[in-house]
Image (cartoon, rainbow, N blue to C red):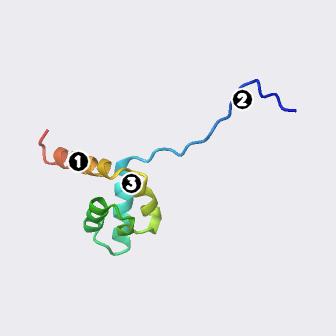
Amino acid sequence: MQDLGNTRFFKVEVEPETGVKVVLSTVYEALTEKGYNPVNQIVGYIMSGDPTYITSHRNARSLIMKVERDELVEEMLRNYIKTNHFE
């Protein structure tokens, strides 16, 4: 019979978090490789939430779905502001 009076510890391996920049870069490259306009496709996904805007090539669809859409917008706006020296 198993002793249920003691606490047992176990380690669960978690997936490493993928940064939003890496996700956007990977998705952009995958869409470009498949001949899509990456800007139009990413905007379509952000506006609608429909993952079919993103190709499954290079696991891009799964990757982008791991990031909240507002995080994608924040990262793109942050980069735009930095690039255009608004800071």
Q: Quadrant of the N terminus?
A: top right
Q: Which residue reaches farthest bottom?
A: 35
Q: CA distance from mark 1 to mark 3?
A: 14 Å
Residue type beneath disc 1 = Asn
Residue type beneath disc 2 = Arg
Q: CA distance from mark 2 to mark 1?
A: 46 Å
Q: Which residue is mark 1?
A: 79
Where is residue 62 shown, x and y percent of the image? 46, 59
In the figure, is residue 58 to the left or right of 71? right
Q: Which residue is mark 2?
A: 8
For residue 65, which numbered disc appears in the image?
none
Foreground mark, 2 or 3, reads 2
N-terminal of the pair, mark 1 or mark 3, is 3
Residue shown at 40%/69% (left/top)?
55
Residue type beneath disc 3 = Val
Q: Is label 2 in a helix, a strand or a loop?
A: loop
Residue shown at 41%/56% (left/top)?
65
